Amino acid sequence: MSSRSSADRYTHLRTGCADRGLRLTPQREVLLRVLSEAKGHPTGDDMVQRVRKVLPTVSHATVYRNLQELLGEGLIRTLEVAGTAVQFEVNSDDHHHFVCRRCGHVWDVYLSSLDVRINRRRTELDGFQVDRRDVQLHGVCAGCR
Amino acid sequence: MSSRSSADRYTHLRTGCADRGLRLTPQREVLLRVLSEAKGHPTGDDMVQRVRKVLPTVSHATVYRNLQELLGEGLIRTLEVAGTAVQFEVNSDDHHHFVCRRCGHVWDVYLSSLDVRINRRRTELDGFQVDRRDVQLHGVCAGCR
DNA sequence: GTACATGCAAAAAATTTGCAGAGAT
DNA sequence: ATCTCTGCAAATTTTTTGCATGTAC
């Protein structure tokens, strides 16, 4: 309900890494910090730039590899915005998104309730583990109408 | 409810283009056909290859430009799968998706009901036009567990 | 000590752009 | 005649890979 603080997010990511046996290298540590402090929806390259403010020699490869790893562990997630680089977001608040199909901008959407009922007859998900339900509203924002 | 046929999808796309003043060039016509017949979630480059089966000289630029245009008009949509090319899908059935965070594969999910209530106090969407509500389930598929 | 992580540098993949000419209305 | 659309070709952007070296545990 209440927004999680940046420090909380950092702790959550750090614990998540530890639990999964991911070592806490300086590069990864800075990335986690950057992620936990991120507002909006930075791209992979954004992240490289931000980490470089602290560790100027960090390589693209390292940041991208780490992002992939965190994604695979479910610690961060991505957003779909066609025609741009993948945008990342830290798993924290339970919020959703509106994406404008004209300008591609993303707005956060908070729900007061969400009821999703899967049609099991038409959907094959046996043995699947569902960790998250994301709602994306698509349309045209006020500025683009 | 029932699946729309490929011919119906094609008609829908073609009408959509006409309504918006998009000319029906041979290249665009083949692309619409390819889109309407697409199973799964082809990438931009997939689409180039498929159009080239009919028009071998079509350029990347043309296909990508057209995809962007159709996206902007809301006639097709994209899916988010980190670490892959953008995947497209024709606006047709009212289905949703499960994305495996390990292998990145996408499964179609059909819902028997969907109730989304926006918290207006916390969400600023005044003057926004919402055309679609997409649910993405995230987790780990049976094969990756 | 050992598996994991990084840097480097290059390659691969994906997408966009400018411009001149062709085609639709 | 005009405005849209295309092809070409190159550039840009984004992401990944292989391998030798370094380091957290």
Image: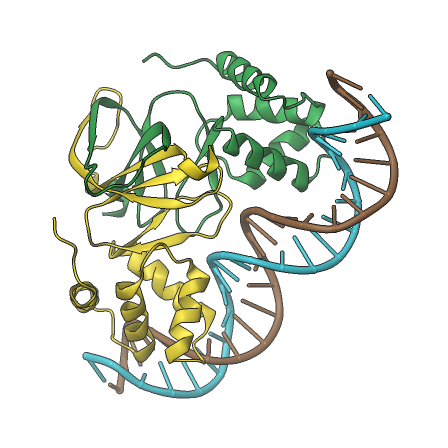
Chain colours: A yellow, B green, C brown, D cyan
Q: Is residue A48 above or below residue B110?
A: below
Location of residue B54 in the rendering, given as x and y in whole percent from the top left corner: 68, 26
Q: Is residue A22 left or right of residue A145?
A: left
Location of residue B128 in the rendering, given as x and y in whole percent from the top left corner: 36, 33
Q: Is residue A96 above or below residue B27?
A: below
Q: Is residue A2 above or below residue B108?
A: below
B54 and A89: which is toward the camera: A89
Determine the residue positioned at 46% across, 13% down.
B5
The answer to whether residue B140 shows anywhere in this view is: no
Q: Name the quadrant containing residue C23.
A: top right
Determine the residue positioned at 34% across, 76% down.
A27
Location of residue B55 in the rendering, given as x and y in whole percent from the top left corner: 71, 29
Determine the residue positioned at 26% across, 64% down.
A36
A78 and C1: which is toward the camera: A78
Q: Name the quadrant containing residue B46.
A: top right
B70 and D1: which is toward the camera: D1
